[in-house]
Image (cartoon, rainbow, N blue to C red):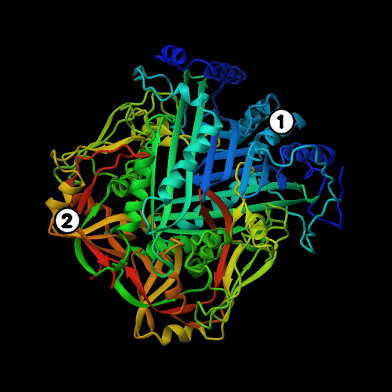
Amino acid sequence: MPTAANGPGQWSEETAVIESPVLERVLSEALRNGGDFAEVFAEDRTTSSALLDDTRVEELSSGRERGAGIRVVSGETTGFAHTADLSEQGLLRAAEAASAVARGGGGGTRTVALGAPVAPGRGDRPAPTTGSKADALELLGRADEAARAAGGGISQVQAGFGTSTRRVLIANSDGLLTGDEQARTRFSVSCVALGDTGMQTGYETAARTLGFELFDEVSVEELARTAAAQALAKLSARPAPSGELPVVLAGGSGGILFHEACGHGLEADHVVKDASVYAGKVGQLVASPLVTLVDDGTVGSEWGTFGVDDEGRPAQRNVLIQDGVLTDYLWDYLRARKEGRVSSGNGRRQSYRDLPMVRMTNTFLLPGDADAEEIVAQTPRGVYVAKLGGGQVNTATGDFVFGTSMAYLIEDGVITEPLRDANLIGNGPEVLKRIDAVATDFSMTPGTCGKDGQSVPVGCGQATMRLTGVTIGGTAE
Amino acid sequence: MSTVEQEARAGGGTDELLALAERVAGWARTGEAVEVYVARGTETEVRAYEGEVESLTSATSAGIGIRVVTDHRLGFAWAGSLDESVLEGTLAEARDNAAFATADEHVRLAEPDGVPAVEVDLWDDRLADVPTARKIELALDLEARTRAADPRIRTVDSADYGDVSSEAALVSTTGIRSASRRTSGYLSVSVIAGDDDASQTGSGFTVGRGVDGLDPDKAMADAVGRAVRMLGAVKGPSGRSTVVFDRRMATALLSIVSSALSGEAVAKGRSFFAGRIGEQVGHAGLTLVDDPTDPRAYGAAAYDAEGLACRRNALIEGGVLRGFLYDTVSGSRAGVASTGSAVRGGYAGTPGPGCRALTLAPGPEGWDQDGVLAAVGEGLFVQSLTGLHSGVNPISGDFSVGAEGLMIRDGRLAEPVREITVASTLQRMLLALDVVGADVEWLPGIAAGQTLAVGDMQVSGA
């Protein structure tokens, strides 16, 4: 069995759910009809979650799945098959199915020899810890109590805990053998407040690439109070304005703007198909000079962090926009190969059942030098977005939306009344040029990114910043 | 329960799944109720790009989800495998989880309620005989004919063929025994029209129970038509306007409304419909029904996710709120029986109440899309909405989404507009929904598509 290549790496005997000689035989089988490249991606995932709702622990759930996806690339064509049967026989059957696309090419026997396993080090990060079911329930109870204590208007509280361990192994016909172990834990609180004007909601979540030690860093009471405060504040919210106004985005969730306004458009799969407004624009000014945008899968324990991507490439830091100038796109193996370069470590997949695609990891705007409070003070009239809830983009047109889940009016440079939820709409390349101030108060926020039916964990981040104008889709005339 | 008929009809692989579920349920201990859900499926997906197969995926999957109720405490566990080695462990884990839940008198498994299941035929035997080469040909052909359809189409970014066959069985110690199986096939295509600086996109699809009946020309025409008619779009004007939602967008709207009709959301004070039974919540002409027994519905089913017969449930009649959808637990909480409306997201999910086949009573004959446009006269026609997850809140009812479409002038589609939002609240929209198309089309999802017009929405643009 392979052993750790470098110190306390994330490779363990348990990671190696399939032995090397078996992998070699499966890869050879996958290439028996020809083909340029074959890969085995094996995954073993365990999850557990608990939900407290309406003051009751309603559901504890545990799950496990393991399986392998086998990919064969032949020219422009990819064959893919997956199986939950990790026996050699099961893997060989999947390899045969995946190889069907490589019709008539090569043939004969091609021997694949795997190299020594490569493991990304954990650095000085400790191994993830686990908590008991009782520990998780205690946290849920504390969150429920804290949310309900925030005010009599809180009519409903739901708190959720979820943790997963994902062990992956990647072996390919280039001889690569590597793996990773990814522990992720999240905790969320959602509140409903009831008042004369109806109901409003608040939601807060903490999620990191950590085990139970997440709760050494995160106070569930604090999350609960924040969620409750949002719901209560919105009870007296007035309708959001309609039309174009300056918008100040608070640090953290405002990073969703970049995820949508340009992040997806910088994914090479869109770019190579000319389905991105950013295609052919490397070296050009695509944003305000205040914008330096980075995608980095190595940052601490952020939600989009990992050791190796789902093609076995170590996570890395990629600068996408430097001082407003587009410097590069995000790449996976397939799209990079076409361009004769290497992957940027952005090949990710939801599970062994899915083909990898170009995906973001942690995408963030580097902080500027303005003062967050000054930015607000220098905005005579506008909208202050304390929290964004999500967004969506059409990469081909660049049009995107992002929705507020806590926003306020800015009047005479002061944050005043809360506003009801609304989407904001803009065009990526236009909005990026309208950033006229970036502060120093950087923070990150976790999210789930959906693309072509696959969801992966990502991080977003920025410091408080201002857009000189963007269309707000409220109901007030 | 008429499970015997269903079992006989489903036949084949579902017998084996029923036997497996029965065996695992048989491991229940005294004093505990156990429900075993087992499912398996096969799928194929072909993506064509520029005359080549970009990817071909073939896969099989299987799994089990087990619920255990002991002393009114519920535990759940699942595994992505039906391998003998995982079965006992999954049951043990569900049992252990139950020990940690809060005891709740309403927590229980479904029991047979005597409602007979309505047979719906969701299985196309012929799908299994379609060779992979034919599936590849369908995707390549769709890609080729879409590329050739219109000189303004710059890129066909994907042209896909896909199919799924799935079988499931559900057995519980409380007397439930049901099995079901279904097949589906689709073709879908998405295109980009125009030059680099003024691109517009469109997509189209066709769905069926198998390969026969798929209509590639419909998918192509829809994708091309939607993209091409948007060429030259500019940011639309702001103001109050009647908004006409095309059939696809109407499906999305009804799906959102459906979450407020969940008996669980109502019981937990998370629906703007809570406490409003018997009140006028919609326009007087509005009648909304969920009827999974309608075989034309994409979400048609004989049995719900707890093994009870699916049935027709009237939710809104003449604009008056008449009822909600319940599974066993939420029904018990509300003091009513399950409406046979449990849904679940596969073996890894637990059941909860939800819609499968929502539809609005159609408007007068002649109200197809053109008829609705003529009736409306002036307004905004929306063919695409974005930000439905970030801008619509089914608890508060706040509604604000990105839109693109065409202006309606003199009862006809006029110039294209983009980068606008439409906003209101779901409550006001239901009251202002005064035109319902007669053009019912069963699109993929949990609701039918019908052209709808909603008065007095706020449009934000230039």
- Residue B365 visible, this orientation: yes
Asked whether the residues under the numbered discs 1 and 2 touch, taking CB atoms below 8 Å apart as contact, a structural biologist would say no
Mark 1 closeness class: few <14, some 14–19, many ≥20 residues within 10 Å: some
Task: Please give the chain letter of the residue carrying mark 2.
Answer: B
The percent coordinates of residue A435 (x first, y second) are 46, 80
The quarter holding residue A415 reads bottom left
- Distance (Cα) linking label 1 and label 2: 58 Å
**Residue B386 drawn above or below residue A462:** above
For this rendering, which residue is in front, B407 or A12?
B407
Say which amino acid is labelled 1: Gly
Foreground mark, 1 or 2, reads 2
Marks 1 and 2 share the same chain? no
Q: Which secondary structure, mark 1?
A: helix
Residue visible at 19% across and 46% down in the picture: B282
Residue closer to the observer: A144 or A86:
A86
Q: Which residue is mark 1?
A: A90
The spot of residue A294 in percent (x, y) is 61, 71
Residue A369 lies left or right of residue B222; in this view the side is right
| Numbered label tally | 2
Query: Few, some or many C-alpha atoms within 10 Å of disc 2 (few <14, some 14-19, many ≥20)?
Result: many
Q: Which residue in the structure is indicated by mark 2?
A: B412
Residue B23: which quarter of the image?
top right
Would you say B69 lies left or right of B298 here?
Answer: right
> Can residue A150 be seen here?
no
- Seen at 49% across and 34% down, the residue is B163
Residue at screen point 47% across, 38% down: B138
Query: Residue B416, how many percent across, how many down?
Result: 27, 63
The quadrant the N terminus of chain A occupies is top right
Give the chain letter at badge 1: A
Residue B386 position in % (x across, y down)? 38, 57
